[in-house]
């Protein structure tokens, strides 16, 4: 295991009725920006619960943060904060609203063009406004990490940044707030969380027993709970387990001291930027094809994954790896998430070289846990995902 520093300051309030905790979390004299998406929180009563908990506090609302939050939209929220001298941010919604809130929190005090710190992955950020979250979509782990993914449609870009100052001070996770999610978003959430674990687990052995067992526990929980929570969206027990699994998939507990991949995400972001494919679906297209191409360098962990997550113990090592990859693809398909570019009317022969060209232009020369995925190999992965 490599040396590591572990730091996660986010307080979690988990369970029914926990939105009431806002009354303790947000200072009485805070001037709060309430950031929201397109209206789901009005329809499901979450907005009313939030306002009740905030009581007499000063609250200014900003609506319209879209899925894959857009820089231009968020800059209007930044201007609102500056104009009204708002000093606290409360995100109420899914990962896009939370990521948007992190951007706004860092952008308000930033001197210069905030797009710079996005391009530089968070470098240059010195401080951020305090922020908290009420999460209504289990998927991204944004509620308990310091990452944010910002799209800029005008430039056809989608880039991730991270900085310790944008950890939420707290996050409220009430599984009941997620009962209103449509099947497509539940599937997306399961698929995204599953991939988050694999990006930190399916690399090469690092003699990290706890991290491995923890990762396998989250993966097996997702596989078990997925059909239940898809079939019975208001089953509290199933949903609560899914919500916590999604948080644990990307809150930092799996990654200390182990190699990480993140190539599926980097390539997936390009597919979303170019074709508007939902984040989780972009991952489902890339992942099986990437695992197949990287089966030699990932061999030991693929065999461990086959045995400990999918209970595959028989046959040759190559056959077990094939089965594990096939089961992973089948898991996504069982959620209703298609796994080929053609399913999204995307022509691999055009998109594969385009993604390679874009990554090259951005100076991305080699990614993955061993730094061996060059743009040429990424093109190969996407051609194989046709
Ligand atoms: O906009 P509203 O009306 O709120 O509707 C949203 C949106 O249309 C809806 N929704 C959310 N909660 C709901 C609900 N509908 C009914 N009931 C509820 N309780 O769901 C739609 C999708 O929401 P969005 O926030 O976009 O989804 P998700 O949470 O999957 O977030 C995706 C974004 O997060 C980024 C992705 O790239 C993408 O931009 N990611 C962020 C990460 C992070 N911060 O660590 C890591 C991830 O890998 C990911 O890249
Ligand atoms: Zn993701």
Image (cartoon, rainbow, N blue to C red):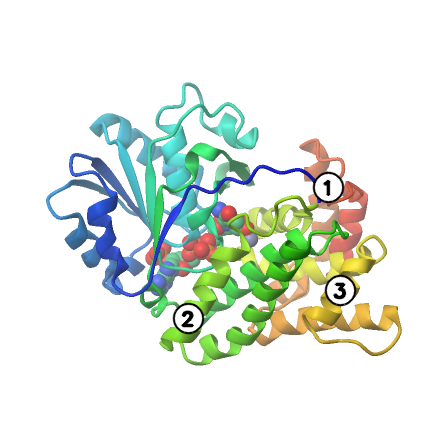
Question: From this viewpoint, is residue 386 visible?
Answer: no
Numbered circle sitting on residue 367: 1
Numbered circle sitting on residue 270: none
Q: Quadrant of ligand 1?
A: bottom left
In the image, residue 281 above or below residue 168: below
For image coordinates 31% across by 36% down, the residue present is 77
User: Which comes before the other along the chain, label 2 or label 1?
Assistant: 2
Residue contact at pointers 3 and 2, CB within 8 angstroms: no
Q: Nearer the viewer, residue 186 or 113?
A: 186
**Which mark's residue is nearer the viewer, 1 or 3?**
3
Q: Which residue is mark 3?
A: 304
Element assignment for label 1: loop
> Among all residues in the image, which is located at the extreme right?
316
Q: Which residue is mark 2?
A: 239
Give the spatial CA distance, label 2 vs label 1. 34 Å
Quadrant of image for the C terminus: bottom right
Q: Residues within 10 Å of mark 3 (few under 14, many from 20)?
A: many
**Which mark's residue is nearer the viewer, 3 or 2?**
3
Quadrant of image for the N terminus: top right
For image coordinates 69% across by 38% down, the residue present is 359
Give the spatial CA distance, label 3 vs label 2. 28 Å
For image coordinates 71% across by 76% down, the residue present is 311
Element assignment for label 3: helix
Residue contact at pointers 2 and 1, CB within 8 angstroms: no
Q: In the image, is the residue at mark 3 within 8 Å of ligand 2 by its beta carbon?
A: no
> Among all residues in the image, which is located at the extreme top?
111
């Amino acid at each position: 295991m490599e040396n590591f520093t572990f730091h996660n300051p986010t307080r979690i309030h988990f369970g029914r009725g926990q939105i009431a905790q806002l009354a303790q979390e947000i200072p009485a004299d805070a001037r709060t920006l309430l950031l929201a998406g397109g209206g789901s929180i009005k329809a499901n009563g979450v907005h009313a619960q939030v306002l009740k908990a905030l009581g007499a506090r000063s609250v200014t609302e900003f609506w319209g943060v879209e899925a894959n939050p857009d820089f231009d939209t968020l800059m209007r929220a930044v201007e609102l904060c500056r104009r009204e001298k708002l000093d606290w941010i409360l995100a109420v919604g899914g990962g896009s609203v939370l990521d948007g809130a992190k951007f706004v929190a860092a952008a308000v005090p930033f001197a210069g063009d905030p797009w710079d710190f996005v391009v530089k992955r968070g470098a240059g950020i010195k401080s951020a406004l305090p922020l908290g979250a009420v999460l209504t979509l289990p998927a991204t782990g944004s509620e308990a990490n310091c990452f944010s993914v910002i799209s800029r449609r005008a430039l056809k870009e989608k880039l991730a940044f991270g900085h310790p100052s944008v950890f939420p001070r707290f996050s409220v996770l009430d599984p009941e707030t997620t009962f209103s999610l449509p099947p497509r978003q539940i599937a997306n959430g399961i698929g995204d969380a599953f991939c988050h674990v694999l990006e930190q687990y399916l690399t090469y052995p690092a003699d990290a027993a706890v991290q491995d067992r923890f990762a396998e526990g989250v993966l097996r929980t997702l596989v078990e709970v997925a059909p239940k929570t898809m079939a019975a969206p208001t089953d509290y027990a199933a949903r609560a387990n899914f919500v916590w699994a999604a948080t644990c998939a990307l809150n930092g507990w799996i990654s200390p001291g182990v190699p990480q991949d993140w190539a599926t995400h980097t390539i997936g972001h390009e597919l979303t930027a170019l074709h508007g494919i939902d984040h989780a679906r972009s991952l489902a297209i890339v992942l099986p094809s990437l695992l197949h191409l990287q089966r030699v360098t990932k061999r030991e962990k693929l065999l461990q994954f086959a045995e400990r997550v999918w209970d595959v113990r028989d046959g040759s090592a190559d056959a077990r790896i094939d089965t594990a990859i096939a089961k992973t693809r089948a898991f996504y398909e069982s959620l209703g998430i298609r796994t080929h570019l053609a399913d999204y009317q995307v022509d691999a022969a055009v998109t594969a070289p385009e993604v390679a060209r874009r990554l090259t232009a951005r100076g991305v020369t080699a990614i993955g846990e061993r730094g061996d995925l060059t743009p040429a190999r990424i093109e190969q992965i996407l051609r194989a995902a046709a």
